[in-house]
Image (cartoon, helix red, strand yellow):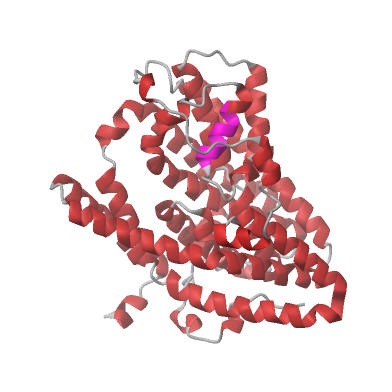
Amino acid sequence: MAAALRKFPFSLQILLGLVLGVALGFLARANDLAWLTSTLDTVGHLFVQLLKLAVPPLVFTAIVVSVVSLRGVANAARLALKTLLWFGITALIAVSIGIGLGLLTDPGKGVTLDLSGAAEPKRTGSWTDFLTGIVPTNPIGAFVEGNVLQIVFLALVVGAAAMLVGEKAEPFVALNRSLLEIVQKALWWVIRLAPIGTLGLIGNAVASYGWDLVAPLAKFTTAVYVGCAIVLFVVYPLLLVGAGRLNPLRFFAGAWPAIELAFVSRSSVGTMPVTQRSVERLGVPREYASFAVPFGATTKMDGCAAVYPALAAIFVAQVFGVHLNVTDYLLIAFVSVVGSAATAGLTGAIVMLTLTLSTLGLPLAGVGLLLAIDPILDMIRTATNVAGQALVPTIVAAREGTLDRTAYDSAGKRDLVDPDEVDQPAERLAPVPA
């Protein structure tokens, strides 16, 4: 049975898990089966926890090794700057779409909600979070708390120092390479459980959240999904064609397993290993992908940090009767492009929304109005985040002439998780040292 299942493509296994999860979720909700809902929740939660367990050592060792390896890559500094530039460009486009949809649909007009039940969230975002969230007060604490942005900062500093020290640091670099291989080997065992995790995650979502909960905010929910869909299926393909001279269908064929997993897991960081593998399968050099993808997983959030906070800010302003002017819309765009790193290691879109609302002077209690449907919104937001995290390295590599076009054109024709490859030595999965 297990051997027969392994012959199915990985993306098809996830799709089957999703379909079965939806069916079980409807069954649990229709028949009020609390035990089934609890079981689905436990299965999904355990899968995400297993993914996140490997993230701190994976991010640290991958970035240390990739930074050291960059000494053998031409124009490494230019690659990093171009990556940041494209992060900003795509974020600006995404937030513009969010603002445009908000002005077009007026998601908060005519909405009748009990404002007395709206409470400020326990965790909020601010510009001090952006600064203090980068540098850890305790290196061990960054790993214990799973603060990915701080781990990225530590890895960049340590990797740069090791690169400058040179031969004397080689034992340390070799240790990181070995640890990276071990973590990746164990992690791909976990990723093979993704279909089961998908079943639990989507099943619990369907069982827990029905139309009766979404109905009062249907216009806003629809606007978020439409905005993210425009970014995913209109903006990204246009950028692939215009900036990279690439076939969008091949991109989605290669990146779809990561986008699927992001949709059900609602975790950019948890999806990061699959995103990196997808990017490498698209022909992006492994040394660059191992830097760009972990960095993007903490700061590149077109769904959570651009489309969503723009629409949500307009929604909150309309519900509370506050008029927004051109300056306010420019502030929304500024926060989305510059402040998204404040969400890393915290609570994603919620913190980004509080950062946006506080910058505009809007009541933070408005966040409480949207908390009930946040898991539903988070699925499409995270899928958009991860697609953008795969898009930017692909475009940058294409424009730099380092993209393997043959690999790109064959993306999707070979399974993301090849059973034979997973059973081979981990060297095949690790970044190639310079």
What predominant SS class does the magenta segment belong to? Answer: helix
State left or right for residue 383 relative to residue 96: left
Residue 142: say if magenta.
no
Q: Residue at x 49, y 40 (%)?
A: 228
Which quarter of the picture shows residue 215? top left
Q: In the image, is residue 421 above or below residue 107?
A: below
Residue 156, above or below 89 = below
Seen at 23% across and 53% down, the residue is: 37
In this view, the residue in front, 32 or 172, is 172
**Which residue is at the far left?**
31
Q: Position of residue 196 (x, y in %)?
A: 33, 66
Is 104 in front, or is 274? 274
Q: Does the rendering let one see residue 390?
A: yes
Regarding residue 15, the answer to whether it shows in the image is no
Tell me residue 235's x, y (percent): 58, 42
Q: Is residue 261 above or below residue 424?
A: above
Q: Is residue 355 magenta?
A: yes
Magenta segment boundaries in residue numbering: 349-357
Instruction: Locate the N terminus by quadrant.
Output: bottom left
Query: In the picture shown, does residue 256 fall above or below 382?
Result: below
User: Which image quadrant is residue 4 in?
Assistant: bottom left
Residue 171 at what x, y percent from top left? 76, 83
| Foreground residue among 381 and 52 | 52
Q: Position of residue 21 (x, y in %)?
A: 27, 57
Residue at image coords 74%, 79%: 172
Residue occupying the point 26% across, 53% down? 22
